Image (spheres, rainbow, N blue to C red):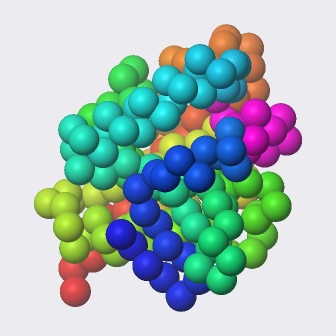
Amino acid sequence: MIETDRLLLRHWQEGDLPAFRAQSFDEEGMRFLLVIEDEAAFEAMLARLDLWRDAIGHTFWAVISKSDGAFLGLCGLKHGGRGTAIEGMTEIGWRLGKDYWGQGYAREAAQAVLDWAWASLEVAEIAAITASTNAASWRLMQRLGMKRQHDFDFDHPLVDDGSPLKPHITYFIGRPTS
């Protein structure tokens, strides 16, 4: 669906699921994200990915290495979640397995998704959120040209009170003018 020099972003295939399942239950790799508690929660997440694809025409796609076909993680677009500061807005997100951190894959995938969005969607801006403690994620948002909007920071409704992951920060990028 979306191709870069090193990556292919595409709809999910059955063969992606073992690596995605392993990533989803990896405690270190998920330390800044909402917990996937059990197999039922994992299956519900898969169903949401399909629902977004069918309902809005895009989702968080599988990110595949072109060199060896490895499943690296996910990246894509959805509508901002209910009860968040960006509810209903177009949201970009990414998650890669820890073996693929620090190699530029997340930036490459996210930039390709932004380019696809500007060419394919009639949106004026795209948002991204992350736990305020997730410095790697907000630094990537900045490298993508996104700007923090402090007035959109919020406590995530799906995170337990008292958790260091409760406070979330919000970044936006507007449609390029040229």
> Where does the magenta region start and end?
22-34
Q: Position of residue 176 (x, y in %)?
A: 27, 76
User: What is the x, y in percent for residue 99?
Assistant: 82, 61
Query: At 39% across and 21% down in the image, what residue appears?
Result: 83
Q: Extreme top residue here?
A: 161
Q: Is residue 13 magenta?
A: no
Residue 61, above or below 51? below
Residue drawn at x 41%, y 39% is 49
Left or right of 28: which side holds 68? left
Q: Where the N terminus falls, by quadrant?
A: bottom left
Image side of residue 165 versus residue 122, left or right: right
Asked if 128 appears above or below 22 in the picture, the reply is below
Coordinates of residue 167 in the picture (x, y in percent): 62, 29
Visible in this render: residue 85? Answer: no
Look at the image and say whether residue 25 sits in the magenta stretch. yes
Residue 145 coordinates in the image, percent (x, y) = 47, 71
Q: How many marks?
A: 0
Which is nearer the eye, 90 or 71?
Answer: 71
Classify residue 163 as left or right of residue 54. right
Tell which of 18 and 26 is nearer to you.
18
Residue that sits furthest to the front in the current view: 14
